[in-house]
Amino acid sequence: MASRESLFIGIDVSKQTLDVAFGADPHAPRETIPYTNEGVQLLVTRLQRLQPTLIVLEATGGLERMVFAQLLQAGVPTARVQPRRVRALAHAEGRQAKTDRLDARLLARFAERVRPPHHQATDEQRASLRDLLVRREQVIQMRTAEINRLTAAAPNLRPGIQQHIDWLDQEIRALEQERDNEAERTDEVRRKRELRDSVPGIGAITALNLLLRLPELGTINRKEAAAFVGVAPYANQSGAQHKPRHISGGRRDVRSVLYMATLAATRRRLVRRAFDQRLCQAGKPRKVAIVAAMRKLLTILGAILRQQKPWDPAVHTSAP
């Protein structure tokens, strides 16, 4: 087994078991543990004694939440990463096979080579709030679908559809109340939300969405923030060929929220200068100008969180 100072562990999560690789080396121990409350508690206790450098597990749509939360609460350095990042390492190594045992070892190698930043216990609190936001969006989509059906439905079906719409309205209000209560109980979320709420055009829901889906904002520079969201312009050149710059990747859900916030902000002249400058350039489509304004607004929000000071038009409209 690797020394305590350099122990990297990978955990592959499935519905019934946890495959654990105690090291990136192919000969390091590996075990399969029942994915139960008792099994997780025993594993966490053991990992606390081992004091690993880093544990990595994949985001699996919430299946990993129980073990992830307990590891964070126990103070064990743990990172949850997107599966595509791990598979990219496998492809780079020329590995095509995929089993739980191989995945656990691959996660340990990913921990050793990439060393993603480990999460904090507050990240799990944010995850709970994020779940409430996602569920609210899902219920709103269901309500919209039912409203669309109502107009074309047969007369004998309309009362039932309307009853479902009324129930969905109640569910949305209940989720919003639970969301607000949870946000108030989390000091960090409440403080940052108040700072973002101070920006004209940024509503309470938008502020909370950005806080939960881009928690790094305020701790990273503007170029990193733009790349995280997917609004950073990338060059596209090869030899004598020079194609227009383009945006790529990033967090789609954050980008959607930021897009709507930017439209509201431009109407309040918050980022009007960047918006108009882009529009005035010959041949620049309107959406290119909007993306420039999105970057501007992102920079402003980052400056506010970094300085821990509320919105000041004399300062933040000229944020670098």
Image: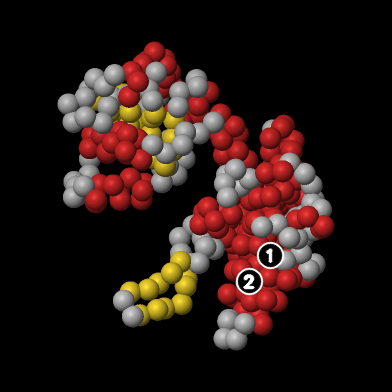
**What residue do we see at 46% from left, 36% from top?**
117
Colour pattern: secondary structure
Q: Position of residue 318 (x, y in %)?
A: 73, 60
- In the image, what residue type sits under mark 2? Ile
Between disc 2 and disc 1, whose residue precedes?
1
Residue 51 quadrant: top left
User: Element type at marker 2?
Assistant: helix
- In the image, what residue type sits under mark 1? Thr
Position of the N terminus by quadrant: top left
**What residue do we see at 82% from left, 57% from top?**
314
Position of the C terminus by quadrant: bottom right
Is residue 234 something one can see in this rendering? yes
* Location of mark 2 (residue): 290
Residue count near mark 2 (Cα–Cα under 10 Å), binned few <14, some 14–19, many ≥20: many
**What residue do we see at 28% from left, 24% from top?**
22
Q: Position of residue 169 (x, y in %)?
A: 72, 54
Residue 285 quadrant: bottom right
Is residue 16 something one can see in this rendering? no
**What residue do we see at 60% from left, 86% from top?**
282
* Location of mark 1 (residue): 262
Q: Position of residue 177 (x, y in %)?
A: 74, 42
Q: Residue furthest bottom?
A: 282
Left or right of 31 in this view: 162:
right
- CA–CA distance in space, label 2 to label 1: 7 Å
User: Element type at marker 1?
Assistant: helix
Assess whether mark 1 and mark 2 are in contact (beta carbons under 8 angstroms). yes
Q: Is residue 246 above or below residue 284?
A: above
Residue 30 quadrant: top left
92 and 163: which is toward the camera: 92
